[in-house]
Image (cartoon, grey):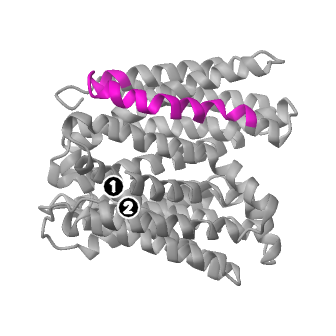
């Protein structure tokens, strides 16, 4: 678990840590800020497009091999990012880094299933959720700390000692898991990459007012290719896209719950800083401070939820958690005109406690409702649902802000937050519908 924790920390951190340094990168590399954004988007696209193919490889070759190869690729790509002489080179290195991160993310939950005994799987999944929450919360702070004493390449160089340590520990301790002995389907991998790549690019482009036609075309292309992808997968005995797992009600409902919850969280994460800075006229530092209770509450609740998930129905726990999160977001939308720090802090703490109570039980259902030999596919779908939900949430914020342009930032934020409440409520309903041993 130390090896899993170190690698997951780096993979999650690098998904957010670069955002803070984008203006500096653009200046140093002499490019427009709009061009530098692909340093972030390229990483996200690579991770999302590669998750399911690498999860399939994990089933075929063993999760340990995919994890070690992904971790090694991530460390090597981090060095390439730090030494990048141009934007094109940096983007290429970030794509490679995203592929390495996908190798880690695609099978981490599957490995947990083989590290912990069955009676403690909820606790293991809770530990992973804790790692993700802490890394997410620490991202901006770590970036600011590094940039205060060093240049932006050090954002990537710090991965080298941590990554090498993780490789040393992982090579000695990660369990050897059964291999299916199947064949890797290259056509499925291409269709998967096109589907999720076009979908993520199209969703991201919705936020650009001058590119709506391109965005809709890309999303339409993703839907068409995705339909062909699914049609092809249902005819395979061991599909790369685990449509066979989606026939399991608890698994399918867990996917819907996860997408809804992560979309709701992302809406709040993006819209609240606009409220704090544009409406309350607070500084960026104060804004970061006010956002901190949410991830801290997740990190506090995650291990507790893991223990509860080993004793009580995970579907019920997830439903209660998302109901608490919806209540927290709703109370935030109803903030008074001049809120105090305490007014904001207790509301975001409630959101974080609710999300933390949902996340671990939901992940446990995802991994335990699948057959043991399909743990890789289940793990890949868990990460895919998270990234898809986050992308949808970001796109919804862009759409809401565009539709409410001219009505004021406070109005736009309120509409976005009520959208998040609706999504959290939808996720709560999907969660409590789960029945059976896993749900």
Residue 406 seen in this snapshot? no
Badge 2 density bin: few <14, some 14–19, many ≥20, Cα 10 Å: many
How far across and how far down the image is residue 254, in percent? 32, 37
Please, is residue 163 above or below residue 433 in the view?
below
How far across and how far down the image is residue 373, in percent? 15, 54
Residue in front for this viewpoint, 304 or 417 = 304
Please, is residue 187 above or below residue 223 in the view?
below
- Residue drawn at the location 36% of the way across and 69% of the way down: 68
For residue 293, what is the image quadrant?
Answer: top right
Please, is residue 74 above or below residue 122 in the view?
below
How far across and how far down the image is residue 340, in percent? 80, 18
Badge 1 density bin: few <14, some 14–19, many ≥20, Cα 10 Å: many
Left or right: 23, with 314 as reference point: right
Is residue 312 highlighted in magenta? yes
Q: Main secondary structure of the magenta part?
A: helix
Please, is residue 176 above or below residue 248 in the view?
below
Residue 93, which numbered label? none
Residue designated by label 1: 380
Residue 51, which numbered label? 2
Which residue of the protein is positioned furthest toward the bottom in this rendering? 85
Question: Separation of disc 1 and disc 2 at Cα?
Answer: 5 Å
Left or right: 100, with 266 as reference point: left
- Please report the bounds of the magenta region as a residue range: 289-317
- Residue drawn at the location 16% of the way across and 49% of the way down: 372
Q: Which SS class for mark 1?
A: helix
Marks 2 and 1: in contact by CB < 8 Å? yes
Residue 339 seen in this snapshot? yes
């Amino acid at each position: 678990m130390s090896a899993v924790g170190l690698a997951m920390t780096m993979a999650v951190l690098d998904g957010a840590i670069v955002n803070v340094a984008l203006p500096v990168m653009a200046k140093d590399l002499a490019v427009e800020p709009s061009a530098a954004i692909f340093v972030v988007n390229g990483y996200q696209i690579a991770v999302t497009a590669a998750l399911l193919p690498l999860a399939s490889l994990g089933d075929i070759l063993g999760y340990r091999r995919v994890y070690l190869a992904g971790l090694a690729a991530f460390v090597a790509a981090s060095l390439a990012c730090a030494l990048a002489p141009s934007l094109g080179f940096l983007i290429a290195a970030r794509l490679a880094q995203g592929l390495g991160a996908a190798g880690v993310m695609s099978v981490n939950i599957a490995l947990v299933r083989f590290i912990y005994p069955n009676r403690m799987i909820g606790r293991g999944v809770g530990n992973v959720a804790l790692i993700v929450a802490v890394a997410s919360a620490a991202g901006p702070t770590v970036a600011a700390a590094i940039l205060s004493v060093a240049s932006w390449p050090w954002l990537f160089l710090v991965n080298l000692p941590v990554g090498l340590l993780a490789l040393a520990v992982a090579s000695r301790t990660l369990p050897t898991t059964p291999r299916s002995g199947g064949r890797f389907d290259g056509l499925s991998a291409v269709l998967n990459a096109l589907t999720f790549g076009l979908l993520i690019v199209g969703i991201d482009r919705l936020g650009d007012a001058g590119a709506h036609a391109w965005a809709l075309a890309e999303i339409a292309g993703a839907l068409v290719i995705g339909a062909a992808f699914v049609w092809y997968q249902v005819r395979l005995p061991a599909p790369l896209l685990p449509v066979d797992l989606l026939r399991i009600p608890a698994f399918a409902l867990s996917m819907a719950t996860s997408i809804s919850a992560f979309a709701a969280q992302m809406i709040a994460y993006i819209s609240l800083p606009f409220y704090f800075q544009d409406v309350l006229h607070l500084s960026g530092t104060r804004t970061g401070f006010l956002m901190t209770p949410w991830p801290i509450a997740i990190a506090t609740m995650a291990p507790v939820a893991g223990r509860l998930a080993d004793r009580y129905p995970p579907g019920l726990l997830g439903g209660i958690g998302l109901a608490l999160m919806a209540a927290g977001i709703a109370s935030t939308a109803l903030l008074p005109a001049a809120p105090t720090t305490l007014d904001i802090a207790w509301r975001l703490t409630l959101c974080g406690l609710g999300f933390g109570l949902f996340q671990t039980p939901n992940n446990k259902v995802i991994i335990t409702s699948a057959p043991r030999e399909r743990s890789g596919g289940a793990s890949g779908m868990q990460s895919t649902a998270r990234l898809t939900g986050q992308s949808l949430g970001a796109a919804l914020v862009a759409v809401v802000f565009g539709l409410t342009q001219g009505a004021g930032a406070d109005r736009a934020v309120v509409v976005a937050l009520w959208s998040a409440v609706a999504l959290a409520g939808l996720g709560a309903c999907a969660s409590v519908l789960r029945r059976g041993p896993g749900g």
